[in-house]
Amino acid sequence: MKTASPDNHALSDVGGIGIGGISAGPLLFMAIFLFYWISMTPFVDLTGAGILDPSAGNSNRLNQIVSLSLFAGTLCYGMLHPLRATILQPRALLLPMFGWFLFVSLISSHPMLGIKAVILTVMATINASIYLLMPETEKQFAKMLGIGTLIVLATAYYGIVFKPELSIHQLSELREPMNAGMWRGHFPHKNSAAAAMVIAAFCGLFVMNSWSRLAGIAIVVLSVIFLVHTGGKTSSAMLPGILILAWVFERLRFLRIPIAIGGVALFNLFAVGSAVFRPLGEFITSLGIDATFTNRADIWRFAFTALAENPITGYGIKAFWQTQELVYSGGAVETWAVTAANGHNSYLDIALMTGIPGLFLTLLWVLVLPLRDISRLPAAIEHSDLTRLFIRVWLYVIFNAGLESLFFEGGNLLWFTFLYCLYGLRFQSSATLTEERFAPAERPAAHA
């Protein structure tokens, strides 16, 4: 009877690529993980006046150098790997999609912003398509994921203890002083910290079952404690909610499409729809739910009005929110939404930036293709801990995207994690089954 090698799911076991006997894969894996999770500029000061300047970027020369170096190293690793054909797949969808993004950016009022954003997005996608080729076994993947997550948690708690003025929101912050007292650690905002802790908890559950029970439990406990102190109500509610939803998704196949597509559609209807359709908003309020979704309703109404004026090509990547024309247009007299950092809804933001065609291509990539890959999972892999991790992250992001702008954010850790989980599901759906347990030097590769 054929069985799936436990070290041979999405992770290829073809031997390390390195120099002088040192495998480059684990080194690159950890460097990329820490780059996305900790960044080159942790503990950002939110009390400075520059935080309100729409033209002020968060990039710096060191960040650019490190980002380009990691991309070059990852690309070289991927091109030398036997599974290099998996890089940037499925190209039949991604190339037209990125081509459309580039087109709408070129005709926008800020073409250079769009071109830069598209390049960063392509780089992140290439990195993610190679990322799971770096660990040599599933156990090594779990070990590196566990160690990396523990380092991240140590950094976050270090900030709370030794740098509270930069790790806990302060009343002196210019943009959102109402968040005073809420933990953010080394992350730029409590919401990004909360989302990171949810992903860390998922990683802890995987580590607990695939590498070290003690390390996994420590990750889960530390993540949940930090999550509670961020004050992130949505993420705190979604952590147990996604675990339950993923359990149902895994066991009841006939509910998978209704959960993924129907659930996301219904969630966006109740959230964004309540801002546009007054009767729906009144119904949501009657249920005891804040129909403004923490004042997001004003942003969504404004975004829908703008989208209606340019529904086909949108406004271009990064060419709408926080632009000089919008912030200083005088529209703040009518609505404060003109000063919003983003649309707080990934689906609405993609439509706003790339038009309805861009939204359609995005939905194909992030919703339809993962469902197809999950439907093709071999029986021995369908209920594995690795598949479970990928599905949990995927479900969390597609639902959380209804309240936050996450898609195509090149340096966002949540987006990057989501990307490599998409590739993980793709690899899992075509993993090779083996006849028997092989020795590490003999075990065949999982073919994508």
Image: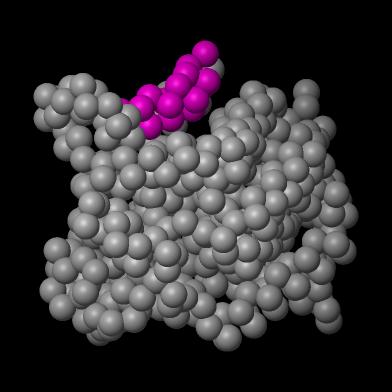
| Quadrant where the image shows the N terminus | top right
Residue that appears at 17% across and 74% down: 170
Q: Is residue 267 left or right of residue 62?
A: left
Q: Is residue 212 left or right of residue 234?
A: right
In the figure, residue 63 lies in which quadrant? Answer: bottom right
Q: Find the residue positioned furthest to the top.
A: 254
Q: Is residue 267 magenta?
A: yes
Q: What's the image's color scheme?
A: one colour
Q: How many marks?
A: 0
Residue that appears at 45% across and 36% down: 308
Where is residue 53? Give x, y as percent. 36, 76
Q: Is residue 244 magenta?
A: no
Residue situated in front as seen by the camera: 370 or 364: 364
Where is residue 231? Give x, y as percent. 20, 56
Q: Of helix, strand and loop, which mostly describes the magenta segment?
A: helix
Say above or below: 360 vs 132: above
In the figure, residue 328 lies in which quadrant? Answer: bottom left
Say above or below: 121 vs 305: below
Residue situated in front as seen by the camera: 116 or 380: 116
Where is residue 129? Give x, y as percent. 71, 53
Residue that appears at 64% across and 50% down: 104
| Quadrant where the image shows the C terminus | top right
Where is residue 439? Give x, y as percent. 80, 51
In the figure, residue 222 lies in which quadrant? Answer: bottom left
Q: Is residue 205 left or right of residue 136?
A: left
The stretch of residues the image draws in magenta is 254-270
Residue situated in front as seen by the camera: 417 or 326: 326
Residue situated in front as seen by the camera: 128 or 216: 128
Decide if residue 416 is in sight here.
no
